[in-house]
Image (spheres, helix red, strand yellow):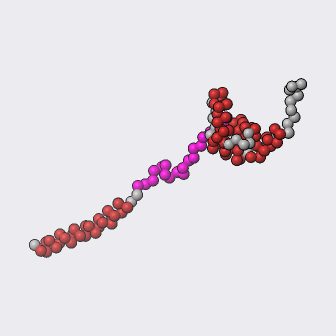
């Protein structure tokens, strides 16, 4: 009986030695990547604002150089939300003012040096 028991134990040990690497590999194996993971992430951007919005923000900033982004966004939205269903955020106004600082300066210079309209009060 002892030899028979030894034979069974050695067989089980051999089977376990064969299975353990496979089980270990199965637990460490990762799932194959999904198609979303293999392709590079696509960026989804909103549609750009029309050009007239940028020009209007530049015009407002030229008229009110001391006004901040919140004030400009508030006045723009009050004026154009009901007419053209167009609104801007504070971030958009800040980015536009930062990118177009030269155009704002040119618009301010034109406002300062413009010729007054005739016929006013005469």
Residue 23 falls left or right of residue 44? left
Q: Residue at point 71% right, 47% down?
A: 99
Q: Residue at point 72% right, 37% down?
A: 60
Let me know if residue 34 is in the magenta part. Answer: yes
Say whether residue 58 is visible: no
**Residue 26 spot, x, y in % from top left:** 35, 60
Q: Nearer the viewer, residue 50 or 9?
A: 50
Residue 23 falls left or right of residue 49? left
Q: Looking at this rendering, what residue extends furthest in the bottom direction? A: 3
- In the rendered view, would you say 49 is above or below 33? above
**Residue 22 spot, x, y in % from top left:** 33, 63
> Which residues are drawn in magenta?
31-50
Residue 47 falls left or right of residue 106? left
Q: Nearer the viewer, residue 101 or 49?
A: 101
Count of picture labels: 0
**Residue 83 spot, x, y in % from top left:** 66, 27
- In the rendered view, would you say 11 is above or below 121? below
Q: Nearer the viewer, residue 74 or 33?
A: 74
User: If the image is split into quadrants, where does the N terminus sit?
Assistant: bottom left
Q: Residue at point 70% right, 44% down?
A: 97
- In the rendered view, would you say 10 is above or below 79? below
- In the rendered view, would you say 39 is above or below 22? above
Let me know if residue 62 is in the magenta part. Answer: no
Q: Residue at point 30% right, 66% down?
A: 20
Q: Nearer the viewer, residue 39 or 92?
A: 92
Q: Looking at this rendering, what residue extends furthest in the front direction? A: 121
Residue 2 placement: quadrant: bottom left
**Residue 15 spot, x, y in % from top left:** 25, 67
User: If the image is split into quadrants, where does the C terminus sit?
Assistant: top right
């Amino acid at each position: 009986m002892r030899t028979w028991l030894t034979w069974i134990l050695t067989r089980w040990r051999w089977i376990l030695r064969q299975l353990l690497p496979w089980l270990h590999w199965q637990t460490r194996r990762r799932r194959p990547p999904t198609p979303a993971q293999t392709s590079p992430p696509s960026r989804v951007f909103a549609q750009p604002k029309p050009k007239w919005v940028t020009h209007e923000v530049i015009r407002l900033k030229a008229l009110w150089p001391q006004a901040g982004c919140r004030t400009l966004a508030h006045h723009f939205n009050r004026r154009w939300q009901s007419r053209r269903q167009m609104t801007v955020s504070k971030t958009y106004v800040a980015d536009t003012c930062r990118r177009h600082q030269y155009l704002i300066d040119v618009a301010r210079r034109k406002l300062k040096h413009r010729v007054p309209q005739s016929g006013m009060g005469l």
